Amino acid sequence: MDGGGLVVSHDDSAAALAQGSAYSGSSVRRHDGDRYLQGHIAYSDDLRLPGMSHAVLVLSPLAHARIVAIDTEAAQARPGVLAVLTGADLAAEVGPIPNAMDPAGVGGRDVALRVLPVSKVVYAGQPVVAVVAETRAAALEAAALVHVDYEALPHVLDAEAAMAEGAPLLYEEWGTNIMLAGTAGTGSFEDVRQTAFGVVEGELRTGRGAPAPMEPRCYVADWDVQTSRLTWHGTTQAPHPLRHSIASFLGVRERQVRVVAPPVGGSFGYKNFGHPEEYLVCALSRIVGRPVKWVEDRTNTLRYGSRDMRLRYRAAFGADGRVSGVTCHMLANHGAAAATGAFGMALAGGLALPSGYAVDVFEAEYQVVVTNKGPYSPMRPFGKEASALLMETVMERVAEETGLDPFEVRRRNWVRSDQFPYATSTGLLLDSGNYEGLLDKVLEDFDLEGTRAEHARLREEGRYLGIGLGFEVLPEGADIPGALIGASDISTVRMDPSGDVTVLTGVTSPGNGNDTAIMQIVADRLGVSMDSVSIVQGDTDICPFGFGNVSSRGVLTGGGSAALAADDVADKLRRVAAGMLHCDDPGRIRLGDGMARVEGEPEQALPISAVAGALYTVGYIVAPDVEPTLEATRTFKMHNIRHQPDDGGQFNLFSTFSNAVYVSVVEVDVATGLVEVLRHVMVHDCGIMINPRFVVGQFTGGVVTGLGAALGEEILHAADGSLSTSGFKTYLLPRANDVPAFEIAHQVTPSPFTPLGTKGAGEGGVACSMASVLNAVNDAIRPLGASVNELPISPHRVLASLQEVDR
Amino acid sequence: MIAQDFAYLAAGSLEEAVAALGADPGTSRAVGGGTWVIPECNRGECSPRLLVDLRTAGLDGIRPGDGSIAVGATCTYADLIDSALVARQLPLLHRMATGITGGRQIQNQGTVGGSAVAARPQSDVPAVITAMRATAVVRGLAGERRIPADELFTGAMQSALRPGEVLAALEFPVATERTTVGYHKLKRSAGSWPIATAAAQLTWDEGGRVSAATLVLGGVAETPVPVDVDDLLVGQSTLGEAMAEVASRASAAVTRPWTDELAPGSYRAAVAGPVAQRALAGAARRDNREGGNDGAGL
């Protein structure tokens, strides 16, 4: 298959970037790193507004119950209490929470979610009543006096049980607990199965994981009675979409809302928009006429889940190890409904199949089911771990059945580097890649045969080590029709009369350094030093529109549009400088090291600051034809996004497809089931890297998340539906000494579609680590006849699998 | 943040602490390092009206006695780690303290006395002090009582202290020159509580044969599980042959295994054997200075 006649434009800026760039491509340190290290960064909870009050929420102790009556009298009477409000009180004031993505838009079921429920609760820990008081202590004390009378209802936690006949229904009006069901893919598995050499089938399960950023959520809403404007400060990835959403919620004009996003301590998707408290504080502030702050505690962050999927698959293959068709069923346990668009994780997981393999026949079926667990939350890599786990398991199984080397089976099935852009059987258009090159590069530093021989020797001593390969292709830079999630952003570049540069972006930074990377891009294009450049992000009154930092696209969209804007300003500088240096051709002016120089005439030079100053002050003399501003605002459209379905009903929502191959080595303690990761060798390809240090930082975080998902992290509930894993002593997030030294290398295959040749780097490492560790564990215990197919690979699961063999 | 108003008393002496706690024992709580009680209060799982801080009550000394060492109730893990006396004469306690989960912050804040009184199944202290045959010295309005460690733990999160009683010290018999120790802690990650622990002490005669053996399992049941291995090990100069029987006895001793979020009871019972073997193997290496021989994966 090829690109289907799609026009591929190669932006020459990628080439320009490679040419004479002082900063881009180098590991410049964060422009504000010292301030983070010295504790000078003010996070949302550091905000103290005059007259600020504090909201505390009364939470449901029950997983599923009707709210019969709420007695707030005792709480109202406490000193310092400003308001005690129920869902019914608020329903009269404000509308339901607007959906970040509407499940009904893709054939699913929607429910009008209120900031506080009016008639029933659907998970333990769901906020029911809001108490606003002068201090947090007063609010806490009053909250303990609120009495809610519940009528308990039967609850369901398991996705399969939730689909059974007679299961308790969370949203009775649906008549089912299935929120969304659909298919992706092409062709008939049944047809290829009949002619196949063999078929493997199996099941995989992933445990429920939490985004768990170091900084929980915190929101401060400030309704100003005098101007009828709301200023919202808080932990958000998406200031502009949130502003739109808050305005709709409050029933005010968008211009009446300002969203300000202070630096955040990690987001991972959790701080996109759509959480009830984001809107609740707005309503509370308007009611009490004062700023209202709400701060989340650690336990609450662990009520939000992701993954929690059951994957069933069948794959048909030839004797040569070529996979001719795959069919799979994906069942996602969403927990309670949410307005965050988190259901899209199942959709993305389905679309991301069959990964980077040239499998022509692919049938994926997905179902998203609501249960009485806490809600799904968006979390990197947004469901795509399912696709990597599934395909990497299929490849291992095919290798086992055919007797071929599992690494060789990958090579035989990968999309070849000369086949890009490649249309997958689920409709995605893979931009570029060299998957075999990734593996070749891994094997430069990994002695496969030697390691296998060593493992065979160690088995004689009763030690069980294994090697596992993981491979991921991550659709990123999403543009979702009908939602404020897009693959473009606006950036403004502005040069002052003094030559200082301000960059304003619609995109924000979750703390990953994309702001510094964007500054690098702009500094290079204007030929100025980094310390001449500053950046403003995350304020809707100041910054141009942007979709925020979602879908791994901060540098792609924010950096790409900033590059174009900087080029416009640079063009003007060249024209002004040409006039001042008596050079006829502005094309001969080179900007660099803070100087404008005539090419080939080094003595003909001016400081760029002088050129800028001249345009502002003597522009009518030195540059009569140049508009008297040094400011440009630009954006761009991705050429490969296709929303209009083709004849086969397929569409492509994604801009870039970063990819990676990992090889893990683990040792399994067969007496205790403990797994230790000894080596984790990684080669990534995210196209052009503006700042390799930040790329490695992103992958390091992703890998740690992946290792946690593979081995330790699992949200658990008691039989009554209450949360059991309420902190980091029971929800086992890896710590520094739990992970091996990472061996990270890069391959650079530029995207032909993006202005700078970059691809996403924000979601990498999670899926690949889950797959490589699972495969390594199975490689280690396969000689004992055992295998695991459920993550996290907790010691008790390993031991149970080994004991099963014993019996 | 603690939701309700409460009074805080920095007790100036043990007597003052006992008087304050005894006045209304149902609504007051003693605080040692506070690493368990304060988070509990923050989470609203308990709402005492009075918190009595023992850190100012002069209970922090490590005092050598006649054949024993008294470790004050508010001695922190760091105090134990830093004590040459503890390292030399209470090697098992020292070993345990160095491997406490939570890093330097917990070592500096948490107390061995507090952990004993909290009696949590998933903590290191109960099995170790049971193996060491420590005695808890407790004080209440009715006077002083001495409780042997094997009677101190009555259930999960339940100690034999009566309402209003305060732990003053833990008294440990000093290990002989010929005693070697082993400690094995199985946990799932650096931050995880212990899933299963085994504390072992072996005493050797002049001929290099075992003259006494102690083995206590922790984390596997509500309270520490002693495993009688004397008849298997006494008289042996190496443990190799007895190890299989050690494992099956350890496993059989876990009759009512503890289940929590980190591991089901069936798993704890299954690993009791290997964990016991590893602790004894550590003791048989006869080097008390050896670092922690924990097992931790993720």
Image (cartoon, coloured by chain):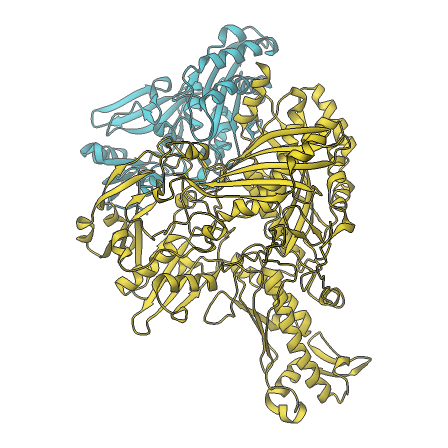
Chain colours: A yellow, B cyan
Closer to the camera, A346 or A62?
Answer: A346
* Above or below, A602 relative to A301: below
Left or right, residue A261 beside residue A329: left
Residue at the spot 37% in from the left edge and 25% down from the top edge: B170
Quadrant of the image for the C terminus of chain A? Answer: top right
Closer to the camera, A734 or B25?
Answer: A734
**Farthest residue, direction right:** A600
Left or right, residue A109 beside residue A318: left
Residue A335 in percent (x, y) is at: 42, 41
The part of the image, by quadrant, that contains residue A323 is top right
Left or right, residue A346 beside residue A691: left
Q: Is residue A293 visible?
A: no
Residue A322 in percent (x, y) is at: 74, 36
Closer to the camera, A551 or B219?
Answer: A551
* Above or below, A799 relative to A412: above
Residue at the spot 51% in from the left edge and 36% down from the top edge: A207
Residue at the spot 51% in from the left edge and 68% down from the top edge: A545
Residue A479 in percent (x, y) is at: 56, 58
**Farthest residue, direction bottom:** A621
The part of the image, by quadrant, that contains residue A678 is top right
Q: Is residue A151 visible?
A: yes
The part of the image, by quadrant, that contains residue A676 is top right
**How many circles with numbers are drawn on the protein?**
0
Residue B218 in percent (x, y) is at: 45, 22
Closer to the camera, A277 or A10?
Answer: A10
